[in-house]
Amino acid sequence: MQTRLNLETGAITGAMKQSERRLCDLAGVFADEAARAAMNPETVVYRVQMHDAEKEGTPGGLLFGTSVVMPGKVGDEYFMTKGHYHARRDTAEYYFCIAGQGALILMREDGTCWAEPMERGTLHYIERSVAHRLANTGADPLVVGCCWGSDIGHDYESIARGGFTKRLVEMDGKARLI
């Protein structure tokens, strides 16, 4: 079966895996836990599709995927992905924005945190040993493509324990990293 990427929506058809994260899956991710708990727990925050032509963990291979982060906020904090480091910290990754507006939030292991604005056509190189997450700052879905080594693995636990040192919130109608 031929695999295809829809360049408008980021949807992958053919050989792929997919997952979805709802508000009920994201306890502890947002600063305002009471606001998250008061929202519909079935609200979809983001979806991920991964082209799985290579088995995860295979040295030397590449994987490709798309993430779609829905518009919305928990309190004043934008909908975002959980975020992760790579299990193999010596590996990098590429993200590119297909549609929407948002931010790529990055954090070094020493806690230095910054954000890069994302809009259709922007390309982002994620350096080694840098945690990363996506946030949607717009009114439409944020659609991001990514390419990474098949043997890098994902370390979500470090972020679940320690979080990011800064959060992307709406203040005075603008996205601000605080």
Image: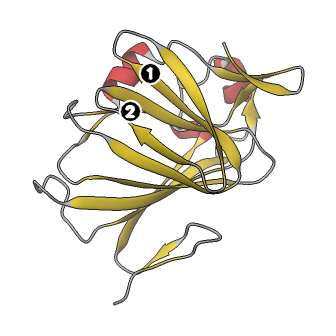
Residue 154, above or below 61: above
Name the residue rendered at 50%, 17% in the picture.
113
Q: Residue furthest left?
A: 59
Query: Is residue 22 left or right of 70 when viewed as pictured?
Result: left
- Quarter of the image holding residue 144? bottom right
Going from N to C along the chain, the mark reached first, 1 or 2, is 2
Query: Is residue 76 left or right of 136 when viewed as pictured?
Result: right
Name the residue rendered at 21%, 54% in the picture.
150
Name the residue rendered at 10%, 53% in the picture.
59
Q: Residue furthest bottom?
A: 1
Residue 82 makes an appearance in the image: no
Q: Which residue is mark 1?
A: 107
Q: Residue furthest top?
A: 110
* Render colour scheme: secondary structure
Give the distance between the C-alpha atoms of the residues marked 1 and 2, in whole angstroms: 10 Å
Residue 46, above or below 11: above
Q: Position of residue 115 (x, y in %)?
A: 58, 27
- Viewer-nearest of labels 1 and 2? 1
Residue 6, above or below 83: below
Q: Secondary structure at mark 1?
A: strand
**Badge 2 local density, few (<14 within 10 Å), some, or many (20+)?**
many
Give whichever of 22, 136 is nearer the camera: 136
Residue 42 makes an appearance in the image: yes
Query: Is residue 43 left or right of 122 when viewed as pictured?
Result: right
Which residue type does callout 2 highlight? His
- Quarter of the image holding residue 138? top right
- Quarter of the image holding residue 37? top right
Q: Which residue is mark 2?
A: 84
Which residue type does callout 1 highlight? Met
Query: Is residue 87 left or right of 60 when viewed as pictured?
Result: right
Give whichever of 80, 88 is nearer the camera: 88
